[in-house]
Each structure stands twice: as C-alpha cells, then as structure tokens.
Amino acid sequence: MITTRIEKLKFIVEEMHLAFLMATHVPDHFVARTLARHILIRAENLIEHARGLRKPLNIGGYNTNHFNITKEAYADNFNEYFRTSRDKLGAHVQDFDFGKRLELWNDIEITKIEYFVEGAKEVYQSLASMSLPGYIQFTEPVELTDPSLKQLLQTYNLAEENIESVEIGADSLAMTRPNTTAALNFTDVHSRASQLALIRRWIKLQNELLSQLVPYPNLIRILKTRVITDIVSFSDCLVTRAVTSGAPQEMDGLNTLITTGGSSATAIDEFLAVSNFQQELQYIRAVRDHIGAHIEIDESMTIGSLVTSLDKYDLEEASTFYGLIEKVFIKTCYSIIYLRMYAADGERMYGILTSKANVGVPFVNATNTGIEPSLPIKAPIYDEITYQKQLSLWLNDSKDQRGYARHYFYNAFCGSEIREIIEEKETFGSSYRLSRHEFREVHSFILTTLASQLTDLTFTKILELLVSCGNGYPYALAEVLVRYGKNKIPEIRVWGLCRALGEITSYPHASAIQYLELHMKAVRLEIRLESVIALFKIFVRSEGLLRINNQNKISREYDDYVSGLMTALDSSEELLLCKLAFASKLSGGELRTYLKPFADNYHSLQNDIKHLCLPYLNDDVESAKTSVLQQLIDTHDYVGVCVHLAVNLENDVRKQFRETLLSACSSGLIVTTGHDQASRHLAMCFLMQEEHDKALIVSEDIALRNPDWLGAQILVAQIMGGMKEREDQAIRKVKEIRQYFKVDSTNEAYLSQIEQALSTR
C-alpha cells in the first residue's frame, strides 16, 4: 500500500515538472496557461494522495510530523490560490462570474505555478528521512535538459501573428488575448456557448502540440490526459449530465438552456436519439477519472497499470467521438441566430487596425500590466516584387495566407499607381452618362501574369482571386479578363473567362458584354452556355438591384432580354440546360438576393422546366416520375432534376444528353440550392460519372454538417467502399458507425453490404 502511493506521488511530481517545462517554453501566454492547468490538477491529486498516505504511515510506526506539516501547508496555499481555478478551468469548465474567471486565468502565472511545482517536490522529499519501502530519490526528468525539446517548444505557435488581422474570439477568455475580438457573455445560454468555444480552442491547440511532440512519450501522456479531460468537459457543457441534485458537478448543458430559453435544440436532441452518446462518453470519463482529472486512489491500481492503460487507450477513438459532438455544437449554433457568433470563433478578419492591449497579463511576468504598445501599421508596398510575393501566398493552400493575400490585392486594386483612365459611355436616348475607371499598376501585373506560361491550375486560382475581389472595384478586373481574352488562348480558358466575367461584370461595361456576346456563337456548347448564363447573371444583378432600390422600377423587361439570350441555343436540349442553369442560379446561388423582383419570372421558369423534362420520362407508370420531378422543382433542387432525368436515360438512345446533364452539374453550370438533399444529389451525380473522389468530398461535407444524420454517415462509408484505395478507411468508417450510432436492422443491412462487397473484391 505504501509503495503504491509513493510511486503515484513521484509520478505526480514528475508530471508537474514536465508540464511546467512546456508552459514556460511555449511563446504564447494563452497556450502556456492552457498547459499549466495540468499543474493545478496534479497539485490537487498530490494533496489527495499525500493525505491518503499518512494513515498507513502512522500505522506502520513512522514519524509523519514533518511530512504532515509540509503537505498541509501546501494544501492550504493551494486552496487559497488555485482550488477554484482547478475546479472551474481545469478538471471541469463550470459556471463562474465573468470578471472573476478572467482574474483567475491571469493568476495562472509562472511565479505562483513554480511555487506549487517546487512545493510538490518538497512534499515528496519530506518522505526521504523515513527510509520507506519503494521510496526513490527524486531526480528531474531528462526532458528538462533536452535542448531540442526546448527549441521545439519555443518555436511552437498555433496561430500566425499578424498585426493586420484580428481573430474573432467568442470564448469566455477572449479578452485575455491580443488582436482578438471579445463579447460579454452574461446570459446563461451565451455563457455556456462561450465555454464550449473555449474548450474547442484548448482541444485544438493541445492536439496541435501533441502531433509535434511524438518523440516525447511522457509529454504525450500529459497532453493526452488534457485532451480526454477537456472532451468530457465539452460533453458536460453540451448535454446536461444526470447527477445527484446538489452535487458539485450539477450544471445545465447547452441543450437544456436552449430549451429553457424557448428555442429548439433539435440538432442535439436528434444526435442523442441516434447515437450511443452516453455509452461512449462513459468510456472516456472512466479514463479521465482514473488518470486524467484524478490519479486513481485505489491501492490495487498501481501507477504502472494506470500508465499502461493510458498508453493503450486509443485517443483517435475519443477524437472521433469529439469530432461528432463538436459538429453537433456547430450545427446548433448555425440553427439559432443568437448563437451563430460562436460558430465563427477562431476566424480571421483582415485589414483591421489591431492593438496589443488586452486585460490579460503575460504568463512569464505577471507584474507587467499586460498592456503592450500598439505597433505602427506599415503602409502597404505596391510594387512588382510584392505583388509576386502576395500572389505566391494566394496560390498556397494555407487559409490564413490566402486571406492575407486576398486582402492585400483587394486594397492594391484601388490603391496602386494609376496607369490608364478608361471612360465608359452609357447612352439613354438622346442623353448619356460618362463614367471613368482606373486601370492600375496591379491590374497590369495580373494581365502580364495571365499571359505568361501558367499551368491551368494557377490560371484557375488567379481567376478565383479576381472573383473574390470583385465586389470592390469590378470594372478594371473585368477589363483585365477581356484584354487577356483577346489573345489566342485554349478553349478551357475561354470557358473560365466567361464564367468569371459573369461573376464580376456589372453594367455598363461594353467590352465585357461584347466579349460574352461574341462567345454566345461559339461552336462548343459549354462556352455558348457559359456566356449566355454570364449575361443572364449580369442582367439579374443590375436590373434586380435597380428594381429593389426603386420600388420595382423597370429598366429592361426580363422576358425580352432572356428571349434574346435564348437565340444562341440550337435545340430543346440546350434550352432545357440553360433554363435549369437559370433557375439554379436564381434559387441557390448568389442571385437569390435578387429573386424577389423576378418571382413571377422564376415561377414561369419552373413551369417551362417541367414541360421540357416530361418527354424524357419514359414509362411513367401512374405519373410517379412526374410526381418526383414536381417535388424536385418545388424544392428548387435542379441538380436533383438532372439526376432524375439521367437515371431515366441510362438505357435510352438519348444517352449522350444524360452525360451532358451530369457534366453540367459537376462543372457548376447547374448549382445546388441550400439544402442537403441537393448536395446529396450532387454526390450521386459524381458517382454516376465514376468520379468517386469528388463524390466523397461532397458526401463528407454533408456528414460533417449533419452529425445527427446516420444516413449521411453511411453514404460516406458506401462511397469509400467503392474505392479500392479507400478500403481501409471504409472498414474503419463502418466500425465507427456501429460504435457511435444506434444501428437498426435496415442500416445494418447497408453496412453488411459494404463489408460483403469489400470481402469479395
């Protein structure tokens, strides 16, 4: 008994030193305090085990006076300084006064933390004079003298620092971080949502650090226990835990608070109904109780057995479970308007002047006021070297780097040196209006870059950059595309230009309109359709805005203009494709904003689509196919309409039109509307074209948005099962579904079919 407790005390002291090492060498104060929470938890564990050791020592005849005085002095100081922090910010995340929480967080600083780390060693060493069985002289862990580890920690920083970007902070400690927005969350439901946002941050940064410390198993164990403990805290904040009334752990979860406030926690309720939430949480809680928030007090469980069980525990399983409940939280936030800000936590805002001032204090020097002077904002440099550097950032896959680059070019498009003034003349009968537009140095850079030897992927990404900046000064951007388009370029790039012009161009812009009208006569159907749709989008944006701002004043009649566009089409098939594209853009794309002034035209468009589709629905017994068609049109699911027709044409002589329909959806000519049924049909479209990778991307996105929809999870497994290179992932996915969800006989049959197909391949 004595030996087992001594081993646990030594383990606790060692972990406190290792946690202190990590906290004092990471450069970010918020990350340091996040890691230092482990010291608070282990300090409480030390007190509990030291007190449990005194009785057997007394029974054994040992003099425990010095040991008792040392540990109780340690316990008194802990209760004064960190007992509440351990309970509210470490082992649990519970309700607390907003200001007091900030105060306690700032109190977690190097001087106080070091006192408890060294004090823990002193408590352990006070046993040395007793010559106890199993007592081993304390020596500092070898990691403390590893220069490579210290260097790794010192260079670690989860978020890239940039004084020209501000992070959206919706968590309850956002005020303690520089360059971060913050909100006062005083109502119960907002307070709970902010706590959940905070735990998401903790888990994210701990997982990030965990992945970098793989060569250090002792540090991995610390981070592993922190992640497990935080997952349990996240679960308890999300879903009300069933505990004895009046228990310290009693707390309303977000689901209860939402319902109490008169809203519906549908996403949480439906997830609880279809998942094995409580069962899986209990497995994780058991690990947390034995070696996470506590060190098991039972003498029958040695520290060796506890460490072995922790090492064997599959953190990936816990992370998969957490991934589901995290997505449930995000879906809940999106479904309730006053919680949407919490889904945006961690996003970046660019171009805002930032300040280092905040109510936080440094972890390493808490005597500092915590208010650092703001650095001067450097004026942007507009020259070719900088353009090239920023373009390289845009071409990168990093979300942050692309965000910085997009903001830079957005400003450059209106702030770099003027090279040319373009005059645009718009006539109104006998009068006219003259507008002047500036073609700048940066526009010339983009034009020159487009004309250089680019890969198609780089060309596409540059178009994406221009489109993303198109709501600022669109005229010059469209002019860049038109001037580039006058060169002899591949048809695939002509198609891309037409699409981009449809996104950017606004009236009046004669050269852009002429370019699109010219390609309405192109030989290739894809280019003809894309130019027609681009002109349609330009018309709807311009005319729609005019009607909205002028009480439905009409400049040009919809029917007259659209009829003119249709003259470019050669057949009923092309007409159907075009009308499907028009309807999908109006109901599911960015043009939805302008739908109201064209509501009657849209209704007529739906009727036209139905009549044009009917000839392709053969053998329509009892009008079943027509009924499905009507339902798809009524739900604005025009990708679904295409899939419906394609299924019917599979063995038809008009099979070529089937491929054209599917291609129109997969290329984005016909877009999905804003519901999951349409996205699922897009995945089906890719599958019918045997583009399994793209189908998987769409289906995984649906599953991530809908962790409470078992069918979406099974669809992912089915698509993976059809891909030879994804067989192992399909097997894991099937296992996860059975583990985390309540699978009925129907869904079990689907899973068995996947396994059978894999076994016979």
Image: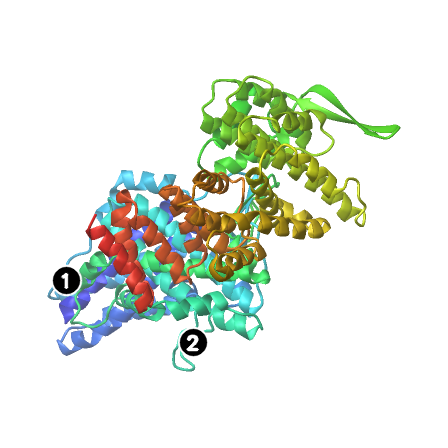
State whether residue 593 appears in this view: yes
C-alpha span from label 2 to label 1: 39 Å
Task: Decide if residue 530 is on the left or right side of residue 431.
Answer: left
Give the percent coordinates (x, y) of residue 184: 59, 60
Q: Give the numbered dot on residue 203.
A: none
Q: Is residue 279 above or below residue 14?
A: below
Would you name the residue on which mark 2 appears? 250
Q: Residue furthest bottom?
A: 245
Q: Amino acid at mark 2?
A: Glu
Give the percent coordinates (x, y) of residue 26: 38, 45
Would you name the residue on which mark 1 appears? 135
Quadrant hosting residue 468 = top right
Give the percent coordinates (x, y) of residue 713: 37, 57
Give the percent coordinates (x, y) of residue 146: 25, 41
Q: Is residue 532 above or below residue 446?
A: below
Which label lies toward us, 2 or 1?
Answer: 2
